[in-house]
Image: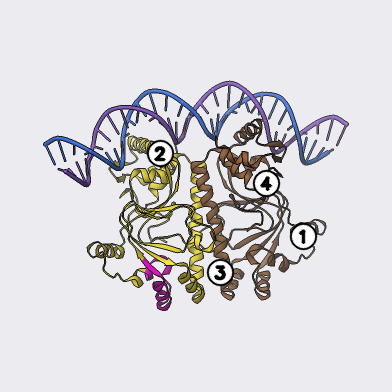
Chain colours: A brown, B yellow, C purple, D blue
Amino acid sequence: MSARGPLNFPYITPIPSCAFYDSVCEIGDYMPNHKIDVSEILANLPLFRQLGQDDIALLVQGSREIRPQKGEFIFQKGDPSHGFYAVVHGQIKLAFPSVQGAEKVVAIIGPGQSFGEAMMFMEKSYPVFAQALTDSLLLHISKQALFTAIEHDNSFARKMLAGLSIRLHGLIHDVEAYSLRSGAQRLVGYLLQNENGQNGQMEFDLPASKQIIASRLNLTPETFSRILHQLTEAGLIQVDGRRITIPDIEALRQYDH
Amino acid sequence: MSARGPLNFPYITPIPSCAFYDSVCEIGDYMPNHKIDVSEILANLPLFRQLGQDDIALLVQGSREIRPQKGEFIFQKGDPSHGFYAVVHGQIKLAFPSVQGAEKVVAIIGPGQSFGEAMMFMEKSYPVFAQALTDSLLLHISKQALFTAIEHDNSFARKMLAGLSIRLHGLIHDVEAYSLRSGAQRLVGYLLQNENGQNGQMEFDLPASKQIIASRLNLTPETFSRILHQLTEAGLIQVDGRRITIPDIEALRQYDH
DNA sequence: GGTTATTCTTGACACACATCAAGGAGAATT
DNA sequence: AATTCTCCTTGATGTGTGTCAAGAATAACC
């Protein structure tokens, strides 16, 4: 799903910087109505990478572009599913609505990732809503197109099974984290998820605003801020806006409180 | 997955009373070494109900019986996956290990349900352990047998996709419950999940010990007991051992605290 | 460049739930 | 029937994290 090492919290692209999608992004920005190469984009999605040309063509036929602006809703909780979505560029959050504006972010979807597949195989409606965190470009692939693709290529079904399994695994990890880990432990786990294998130190930007990350980790912005402060005081991290510096990865990993 | 109405917390069979499996259960009890009809059992699993005779035969070849005693472990967290398990009779719990005997129950699997499918499609090892809550009879179906069945019948792949989607949905529901519902609300939601559509009152037994249910709902046994007491005092439920009586379903549903 | 929104931080306080500890209630065993 | 488990309940107390409220910092906008 990602070349960035083990993702403890899947669905998050901490550093959305895939060269391919960045270039597409510019095309989208400068020529909003330019006919982008949908088939090339689809063929490069992790989910479709092993598909043949003809299957891709089928999917292209069943797909349409969606260009939500920042804050725009893709679908609401309870909406019926007619297909699934792939993020070409931008960022989408999936979340539960809650009382008075409060909400619980389940996932942050970045370029090259997709969402909404699982609901196609059920009669149920979306359990979450999807909202653009930034101006974005999505592809919507219709249920029908995908189902015919599955029938044509049964190795593709296995690919989809693998994809859903990874999500399931990620959700199980979340349940574990929420159940038997403290807020600080969840945050540390989240920070270390970006680990590139590089020893010693690392440095990166948070992929979204701190309140969004906080919600993703099941924390209030206040608690999130305080934990960040504690870790900074302990010398385990440095924070500059969204930029996080970890001087000693191993030391942070040892942190258990 | 179940004919018992909408399952908010899937993986749980509150009243394991399927006539077919009960009869098998007796066979198992009286003739522990009797050659049970594996193909009939497999063919009646929700997951395999639409499979042809030949595909069932393939699965039977790749399956073996497992008879864990109460407390016995089926697999440990970290074990590699070689297939998946179907519960013929008995009860299996999936849980995360935790410090000093404490553990977090993720699911309680009853007759006719299966577990461990998702891990077959990934390279990862089990994120939870599986332990028998009672003496049980399981079928283990090998990865290879299942994969050939998928290749033979591509409608079967869709069936599996649907199965995994339901699990995913269930986990999302759990995440929602843990994130933005109080303990009492989770418990009420759990009790109402057994709702048979019957109006007014209902009555049923908890499917496992209270401490297991408590863990499933992310509560300590103490808190679980206290909430049960509160609900009883409020006249919303009656408790007699594992037997729960709900005099007014609608009243309980209204409960929000 | 200054003004207005957002976003983030920090403090004081409240509360849900966990923890620790001890006592009951059954069921199983002797 | 008595004993030993295991499971459950109840009380006293602690604490992690949320809530409310008010600044500070940053970004967005005119």
Secondary structure beneath label 3: helix
Q: Main secondary structure of the magenta part?
A: helix
Contact (Cβ within 8 Å) of mark 4 with mark 2: no
Tag 4: amino acid:
Asn
Contact (Cβ within 8 Å) of mark 1 with mark 3: no
Tag 3: amino acid:
Ala
Chain letter of disc 4? A
**Earlier along the polypeptide chain: callout 1 or callout 3?**
1
Secondary structure beneath label 4: loop
Q: Are marks 4 and 2 on the same chain?
A: no
Contact (Cβ within 8 Å) of mark 2 with mark 1: no
Q: Is residue A102 visible?
A: no
- In this rendering, the answer to whether A246 lies above or below A137 is above
Question: Dot 1: within a 10 Å radius of its alpha carbon, few (fewer than 14), some, or many (20 or more) residues?
Answer: some
Q: Where is residue A189 shown, x and y percent of the image? A: 59, 44
- In this rendering, the answer to whether B11 lies above or below D24 is below
Measure how far apart labels 2 and 1 are at the Cα level.
Answer: 51 Å
